[in-house]
Structure formats: structure tokens, C-alpha cells
Amino acid sequence: MRKGEQTREVIIQRAARLFNEQGYYGASLSDIMRATGLEKGGIYNHFGSKEELALEAFDYAVGLLNQRMRAAILAQPNTYNRLLALIEAFSRTATDPVLPGGCPIMNTIIEADDTQPALKERAHAELDRLFESIRYTLKLGVERGEMRPGINAQKLASLIIASIEGAIMLSRLYRDSSHIDAVVEHLKNHLEQTLRL
Amino acid sequence: MRKGEQTREVIIQRAARLFNEQGYYGASLSDIMRATGLEKGGIYNHFGSKEELALEAFDYAVGLLNQRMRAAILAQPNTYNRLLALIEAFSRTATDPVLPGGCPIMNTIIEADDTQPALKERAHAELDRLFESIRYTLKLGVERGEMRPGINAQKLASLIIASIEGAIMLSRLYRDSSHIDAVVEHLKNHLEQTLRL
């Protein structure tokens, strides 16, 4: 990797962390300069604007999250265990996030408003993917005969994502893992009762 | 009510709406001036600082939410139906919030950081009250013989608050009530199975 590319990567990684902890408005260019040890020109040498850097930083953050979830899912032989692995990997964000500051998708969605349409759209697309990934696993599970049929995949995806995102917020806020633990335990019991063969 | 008090009330009500929609940083003094039709001096005549106004606006917003929840709960004769009423009144925030912008407690908690310790503390205290209100209803329900004993009140409170707050976010984001509907339906079924006599 050329030195310029290395510098670019370092800026993205440090900015991703700052944005996830402090928000895109909260993390100023001065913060990014301090975190990278670069001057303003050294940063704008690689990115046309703060928005451009924010998009790259978001892709980096969500890439880490997706990588973690994919690795957990692919380690499982059947769809039922894949769904459990997805729930566990996603819920780790409460106590052991891929970047300090919690869930990059939810943080970006909450903060990015109409002044940042590209970033907002990207975060939406990632949340859509998470829904699709759960629906797909449920569909495949029934097709393969690894889960009981008759479940409403869309409703179950809403429950899983809503309760985990809500519990990530509570556990981070109270610095108490009991909230995410309670939700994960509940979801596992619910899947056991409704999906397990 | 004297004219000065009326003006003060109007400022609080309009600021509460702006803060809930745009956040405490996002809603500028100019926005508040525009919404109230007052000059800067006319606002600072009533409040020492934006922080002081933010605290009063938060109390006003959360007062509306608590009023709605209390009215729904008190209309019910027994504790089991009170818990259902609390879930329904709280979840209405997704589609019919007391103020535009969603849940004032969660919005404030997410946004208020270490630069606003008083506001952060107030929002924390309100979330604590919500937890306590659910735990108390469950305790009373068992004592009165209106619910089955043996439930873990703290875990159930975590599940209810996490899943509803998460679903409020999803339904607001997608402008689609199916997420909150799915969570409320699930919680009702869960209570039916675990608490109902």
C-alpha cells in the first residue's frame, strides 16, 4: 500500500471512531485533526469534504459490523443456529461494539437528517439489509426443513431488531449489560418455542 | 395568568416541540425566536440561558407523556390491564407522539451529553421512573393475586422498554407502524402466556 493510501485509511479509521462516539456534527474537523495528527490540508488532500469523509467512515464502521455478523453466521451449520448467531453477534454491540460509541447504523440514522441525504440513505440501506438478512434466514430455514413453518418473518424481524437496538441503548446508557442480556434471553426462548423443530 | 407568565408558557411549549424534533443543539435560538415571534431579549427575559429553557421544555414534554400514561393506567380496574394500558400508551409515541419528534426521554438521553449534565440527569431520572412504574405494577399485581407469581420484574421491564423504544425508532424512521404493531402484539401475547391467571 502506498503511503498516501495508508494515510487515507488511518484518517477513515480514526474519523469512524470519532463519528460513532460523538456524531457527525459533534466530531469537528479539529477533533479529526487532533486524532490523526494532520493539518486541515492533510485531510482535505484525501477527501473533498467532511461529508465525503463521513460516508467513507460510515462504510468502514458498518463493514466491521457486517464482517463480525457474517463470520458468526457462517460458522453455523444450520439456519436456526445462524439466526441465534446473528442475534448474539448483533447484540454484542451493547457491551463490545466494533467501534466505541455503539451501533453505527442506529447512531447514523438518528443523527443524519435532511442536510445529509447521502449518509442518511446509506444508513437506511444498511438497516434494510439487516431486515432482509433475517427474513432470508427464516425463509431458508423453513425451505430446508430446519425451522417450523408458519412464522411471520417480517414481524419477527421487527421484534428482533427493535428489541436489540433498544436494549443496546439501555445497556450503554446504564452501563449495565442486564438489559441486553434480558432481551437476548427472551428472544432465544421465543425462537425455541416458535421455530425450533 | 399574567401576560408575562403566558408568554413564558408559550416559549416553553414551542421550544419543547423544536427541541423534540431537532434536538437541543439542532434547534437554535433563531429557530426559537422564529417559532415564538420574539426577539432574543424577549426570550432571555424569561430564561437565564438556553440550558434553563431546555430543562423547562424537557419537563413540559415529559409531563405530557406522563399525563397520557397516567390517564390510560388509571382508567383500568386491575393491574394486568394497567400494564397493557401502559404498553399501549407508551407505544402510541411511534405514531401519535405527545409532541412531534418521538419520545422526549429517549431523544434527550441520546443527545444530551456531558456538556449538559442537568438535562442528562433529568432524562435519566424519567427513564428510571418508567422502569420503576413497570416493576411496581408487576409487584402489586402478584400481591393482589391479579397476576401469576414468579416473573422476573426487572427483566420484563427491560424487554418492554427496550422493544418499545426500538420499535418507536423503526416506525418513525420507515414511517411504517408495522414495527411498533409487531412489538405490541408480541408483548401482549407474552404477558398473556406468562402473567395472566
Image: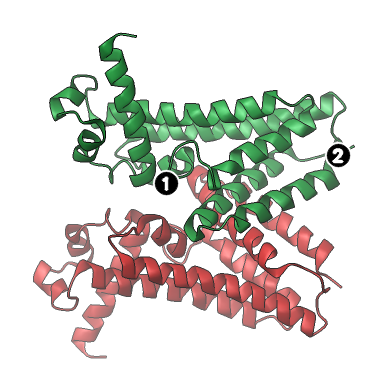
Chain colours: A green, B red
The answer to which of A66 and B78 lies nearer the viewer is: A66
Q: How many marks?
A: 2
Where does residue B72 sit, x and y in percent of width and height? 61, 76
Which residue sits at x=83%, y=29%?
A142
Q: Which mark is residue A110?
A: 1
Could you tell me if residue A70 is visible in this image?
yes
Q: Which amino acid is tagged 1?
A: Ile
| Within-10-Å neighbours for mark 1: few <14, some 14–19, many 20+ | some
The answer to which of B149 and B15 lies nearer the viewer is: B149
Where does residue A29 sit, x and y in percent of width and height? 21, 37
The Cα atoms of the two marked residues, 2 and 1, are separated by 35 Å
Q: Chain of mark 1?
A: A
Q: Quadrant of residue B83?
A: bottom right
The answer to which of B155 and B50 lies nearer the viewer is: B155
Residue projecting furthest to the right:
A197
Tag 2, which secondary structure? Answer: loop
The residue carrying mark 2 is A196
Q: Which mark is residue A49?
A: none
Which residue sits at x=77%, y=28%?
A79
Q: Nearer the viewer, mark 2 or mark 1?
A: 2
The answer to which of B68 and A95 lies nearer the viewer is: A95
Q: Compared to A149, does B63 lie above or below?
A: below
